[in-house]
Amino acid sequence: MSYSQVKNLEPTEFKRLCGITPETFEQMVKVVAVEKVLAKKSGRPSKLSIEDQVLMTLEYWREYRTQFHMGVSWGLDETNVLRNIRKVENILMKSGLFNVEGKKKVREIDSDIEILVVDVSEHEVERPKKNRKDITVVSKNVIR
């Protein structure tokens, strides 16, 4: 689903779909557009518009689908989906205008989680040694 399909939704429906208001979405697009213009990297341009890249990132945050499934629905390879999401996330976090918490922030939340450490390292197992004459004697008896 591209931005051209979503932009005509009512603000309440847009918020239900993306998790943010259309005004916040426009601010995010402006921040990402300014950063991408300033970066000016060489290489092939993205297949998606900036609005679609931001929408894809919001869809990933909202639905938490796999990057493979997102790639199929957006017509991209899953590695390109990952690159686009990381670029948009980094730009939005760097701007400081939006409350985009990273993974480290989520881990720092105080909670009553009990941590249990289990030692599962490998230990050598003692096995009986095989003697050659024991094997030979048995085989001679069987032959006779």
Image (cartoon, rainbow, N blue to C red):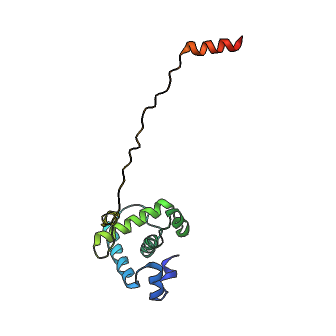
Q: Residue at x 48, y 80 (%)?
A: 17
> Is residue 132 toward the left or the right of residue 60 in the image?
right
73 shown above or below 30: above
Asked whether 40 or 72 is in front, the reply is 72
Percent from the top left, x then y, of residue 114? 35, 59
Q: Residue at x 42, y 73 (%)?
A: 54
16 shown above or below 48: below
Q: How many labels sit on residues?
A: 0
Percent from the top left, x then y, of residue 125? 46, 31
Q: Quadrant of the C terminus?
A: top right
Q: Residue at x 42, y 62 (%)?
A: 83
Q: Residue at x 52, y 62 (%)?
A: 68
111 shown above or below 143: below
Quarter of the image holding residue 53? Answer: bottom left
> Is residue 40 toward the left or the right of residue 137 in the image?
left
> Is residue 118 toward the left or the right of residue 137 in the image?
left
> Is residue 77 toward the left or the right of residue 24 in the image?
right
Quarter of the image holding residue 91? Answer: bottom left
Residue, far right: 144
Quarter of the image holding residue 20? Answer: bottom left
Percent from the top left, x then y, of residue 61? 43, 71
Percent from the top left, x then y, of residue 116? 36, 53
Asked whether 24 or 110 is in front, the reply is 110
Asked whether 12 or 142 is in front, the reply is 142
